[in-house]
Image (cartoon, rainbow, N blue to C red):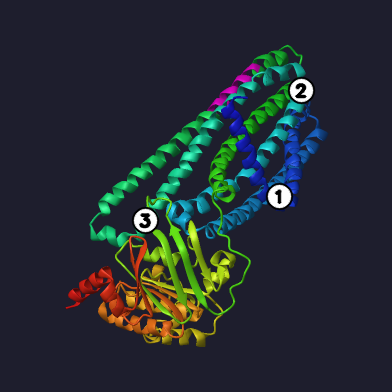
C-alpha cells in the first residue's frame, strides 16, 4: 500500500473509531436498527420473487387461487417492509440527533476550558462553525453507514434470487458489477477533499459575518458597507463554486452507476429475451429476474450516495476531533489546593513572560510584593506590560520563568475555580451578557437573593438608573450591554464584582473610557468596591491613584520605579513625565 494511501487508511480508521465511541451508548437502538435492516432487505427480495407467480400463475395461467393469495402476500410484504423501514430510519435519525447533542456539548465544553491564547489565535466564527456545522455532518455518518449495510444485505438477497432464477443469466448481470467499484472510490475521494474545503470555507464565512456584525458601527462610521458586501460576495462565490463541484462529482458518480446498471440490464434483455422466445424460460421467471436486477442496481446507487455522505462526515470529523483529540490543544489545568482563606500576601518573583507571537519578552524579570490591605497602583505608557502582568495572577496565561506566589503557595497549586473566585477583575472593556440586569449582576451565583443583588447595585451606584429601566432588574440589556451607556455598563460590572466579594481586586483602567461625569460616579463606586480589600489598580489617570500605598512604574516590560506619589516625583523621571503630561492636559 502506498504511503499516502496507508496514511489515509489509518486516519479514516481513527475517525471511524472516534465517531463510533459517540454512537456506542445507543447500541440497543443500533441493534434494533440492524434487525430492521435485515427484515427490509429480505422484504425487498420477496417483492421481486412475487413477480414470477403474479405473472405466470395470474396473467398467463389465470389461476383463481393465485389471484387471491399473491396480492395478499404482496400487501403483507410491503407492510412489513414499511414498518421495519420506519423503525430503522426513526431510530437511526434520533440516535444521530442524540450524538449531535453529545458532540456539541463535548466540543463546547472543551473549547470554553481552553487557555486564553487559543482564543487569541482562533477566529470566533471558525469555532462557531465547528460546533454548528462540522458536528452536523458527523450526525449523518452512522445512519448512512447503516444504510450502506442494509443495501449490502439487499444486494445479497437479490443476487441470491437472480442466481436462483437463472444462474447462467445471472452471470451476465453481475459481470459488470466490478465496474461499479470505480466510481465508488474515485468520486468518494474527490468529494472528501471538496467536503473538507467546503467546511473550511463555511468557517471563513462565519468568521467574516461575526466580525462584520460585531464591528458594524465601525463599518458605518467609515462608510464601508459596499466594501464589506463585496468581501462577503467573494467568499460566498468561492463557497458556491466548491458546492457546484460537489454537485458535479456527485451527479457524475450517480450517472456512471446508472450506465453500469444499464449495461448489465441490456445484456440480460438480449440473452433473456432470446430464452423466452425459444421457450426455454417463462415470461414470469424472466420479469422476476429483471425486477430483481433493477432492484439490485438501485441499492448500489444508494451505497454510492451513502458513501458521499460519509465522506462529508469524515471531512467534518477531521475538524471536530482535531480539537477534541489534539495533544497540542489542552484544557487549562489547576492544582488540587482550594484557596479558601483570606488574602495574606502576593509575591511576584523574577517573572518573565512572552506571547507566542512576540519577538521580545513582554515582561522581563518582574519582582513585586502586595500585602494584605494595600492599594497598589501600576502606571506606565501603553505597551509597558501592565495588563499582561495582572492577567498572569488569575492564570489567564502562565509565565515562562519565575513564580507568582499567593498566600505562600504558587498559583499553579490552586484549583482554577477557587483561585479565580478569590480574584475580582474590573477592566475598561466591560462585557455584559444578553440577559437581564439581575442575571448579569448575579453571574457568579444565579441563586443569589434579590436583596443581595440590590445591595450590590446600590453600593455600585447602579440601583437608581436600574429602577428607571423599563422592567427594572428584569430588563434585558442586549448583546454586550448595547442598550446601556458606558458608565451604566461599568457600574453593573462593579456590582457584579461586589456580589462576588473577592479578597483581591484588580482594576484595569476601569474609568479610562468614560466621560468626566460618568467617571466621577464610577470612581465613587470603585472606592466602595476597594474598601477593606487588597487592590491592584492599573491607572491611566494618575489622579485616581495618588493616594495608593505603592505606585509601580513600568516601561517596556520592566519595573523602573516603586514608591509613593511624592517620592516618585523626585526619583522617577518617567513618573514625573507622565504626571506633567497629564497635568498639562488638565490645565
Residue tagged by mark 1? 24
Nearer to me, 120 or 273: 120
Residue under pointer 3: 211
Judge whether residue 260 is colored magenta.
yes
* Distance Cα–Cα, label 3 vs label 2: 62 Å
Residue 390, picture quadrant:
bottom left
Find out whether residue 516 is within the magenta segment.
Answer: no
Badge 1 local density, few (<14 within 10 Å), some, or many (20+)?
few
Q: In this view, does 177 lie to the left or right of 70?
A: left
Give SS at disc 1.
helix
Residue 434 in view: no
Q: Which of marks 3 and 2 is in front?
A: 3
Q: Is the magenta stretch mostly helix, strand or loop?
A: helix
Other-residue count near label 3 (Cα within 10 Å), few / some / many at <14 / 14–19 / ≥20: some
Q: Which mark is residue 163?
A: 2
In this rendering, does residue 177 appear at all? Answer: yes
Which region shows up in magenta?
255-267
Mark toward the viewer: 1 or 2? 1
Query: Is 216 above or below relative to 8?
Result: below
The quadrant of the image that shows the N terminus is top right
Q: Distance between the residues labelled 1 and 2?
A: 37 Å
Amino acid at each position: 500500500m502506498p504511503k499516502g494511501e496507508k496514511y489515509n487508511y489509518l486516519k479514516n480508521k481513527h475517525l471511524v473509531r472516534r465517531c463510533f465511541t459517540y454512537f456506542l451508548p445507543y447500541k440497543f437502538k443500533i441493534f434494533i436498527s440492524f434487525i430492521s435492516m435485515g427484515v427490509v432487505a429480505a422484504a425487498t427480495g420477496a417483492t421481486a420473487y412475487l413477480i414470477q407467480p403474479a405473472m405466470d400463475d395470474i396473467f398467463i395461467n389465470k389461476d383463481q387461487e393465485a389471484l387471491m393469495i399473491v396480492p395478499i402476500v404482496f400487501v403483507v410484504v410491503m407492510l412489513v417492509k414499511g414498518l421495519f423501514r420506519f423503525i430503522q430510519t426513526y431510530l437511526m435519525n434520533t440516535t444521530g440527533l442524540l450524538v449531535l447533542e453529545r458532540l456539541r456539548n463535548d466540543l463546547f465544553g472543551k473549547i470554553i476550558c481552553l487557555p486564553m491564547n487559543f482564543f487569541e489565535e482562533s477566529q470566533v466564527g471558525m469555532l462557531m462553525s465547528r460546533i454548528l456545522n462540522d458536528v452536523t455532518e458527523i450526525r449523518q455518518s452512522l445512519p448512512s453507514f447503516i444504510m450502506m449495510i442494509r443495501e449490502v444485505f439487499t444486494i445479497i438477497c437479490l443476487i441470491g434470487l437472480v442466481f436462483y432464477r437463472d444462474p447462467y443469466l445471472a452471470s451476465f448481470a453481475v459481470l459488470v458489477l466490478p465496474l461499479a467499484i470505480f466510481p465508488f472510490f474515485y468520486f468518494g475521494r474527490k468529494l472528501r477533499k471538496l467536503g473538507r474545503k467546503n467546511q473550511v470555507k463555511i468557517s471563513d464565512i462565519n468568521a467574516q459575518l461575526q466580525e462584520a456584525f460585531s464591528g458594524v458601527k465601525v463599518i458605518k462610521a467609515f462608510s464601508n458597507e459596499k466594501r464589506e458586501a463585496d468581501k462577503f460576495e467573494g467568499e460566498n462565490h468561492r463557497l458556491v463554486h466548491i458546492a457546484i463541484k460537489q454537485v458535479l462529482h456527485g451527479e457524475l458518480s450517480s450517472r456512471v452507476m446508472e450506465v453500469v446498471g444499464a449495461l448489465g440490464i441490456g445484456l440480460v434483455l438480449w440473452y433473456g429475451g432470446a430464452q423466452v422466445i425459444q421457450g426455454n424460460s417463462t415470461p414470469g421467471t424472466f420479469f422476476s429476474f429483471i425486477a430483481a436486477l433493477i432492484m439490485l442496481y438501485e441499492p448500489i446507487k444508494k451505497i454510492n450516495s451513502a458513501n458521499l455522505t460519509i465522506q462529508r462526515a469524515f471531512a467534518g470529523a477531521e475538524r471536530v476531533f482535531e480539537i477534541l483529540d489534539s495533544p497540542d490543544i489542552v484544557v487549562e489545568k489547576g492544582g488540587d489546593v482550594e484557596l479558601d482563606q483570606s488574602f495574606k500576601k502576593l509575591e511576584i518573583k523574577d517573572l518573565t513572560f512572552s506571547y507566542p507571537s512576540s519577538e521580545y519578552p513582554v515582561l522581563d524579570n518582574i519582582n513585586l510584593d502586595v500585602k494584605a490591605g494595600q492599594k497598589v497602583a501600576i502606571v506606565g505608557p501603553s505597551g509597558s506590560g501592565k495588563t499582561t502582568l495582572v492577567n498572569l495572577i488569575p492564570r489567564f496565561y502562565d509565565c515562562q520563568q519565575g513564580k507568582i506566589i499567593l498566600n505562600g503557595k504558587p498559583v499553579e497549586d490552586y484549583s482554577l475555580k477557587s483561585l479565580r473566585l478569590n480574584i475580582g477583575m474590573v477592566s475598561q472593556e466591560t462585557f455584559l451578557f444578553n440577559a437581564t440586569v439581575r442575571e448579569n449582576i448575579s453571574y457568579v451565583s444565579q441563586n443569589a437573593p434579590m436583596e443581595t443583588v440590590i445591595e450590590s447595585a446600590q453600593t455600585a451606584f447602579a440601583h437608581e438608573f436600574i429602577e428607571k429601566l423599563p422592567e427594572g432588574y428584569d430588563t434585558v440589556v442586549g448583546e454586550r450591554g448595547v442598550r446601556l451607556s458606558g458608565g451604566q455598563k461599568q457600574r453593573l460590572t462593579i456590582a457584579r464584582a461586589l456580589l462576588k466579594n473577592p479578597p483581591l481586586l484588580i482594576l484595569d483602567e476601569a474609568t479610562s473610557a468614560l466621560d468626566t461625569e460618568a467617571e466621577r460616579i464610577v470612581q465613587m463606586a470603585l472606592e466602595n468596591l476597594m474598601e477593606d480589600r487588597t487592590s491592584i489598580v492599573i491607572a491611566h489617570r494618575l489622579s485616581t491613584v495618588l493616594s495608593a500605598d505603592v505606585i509601580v512604574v513600568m516601561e517596556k516590560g520592566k519595573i523602573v520605579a516603586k514608591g509613593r506619589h511624592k517620592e516618585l516625583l523626585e526619583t522617577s523621571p518617567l513618573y514625573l513625565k507622565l504626571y506633567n503630561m497629564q497635568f498639562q492636559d488638565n490645565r
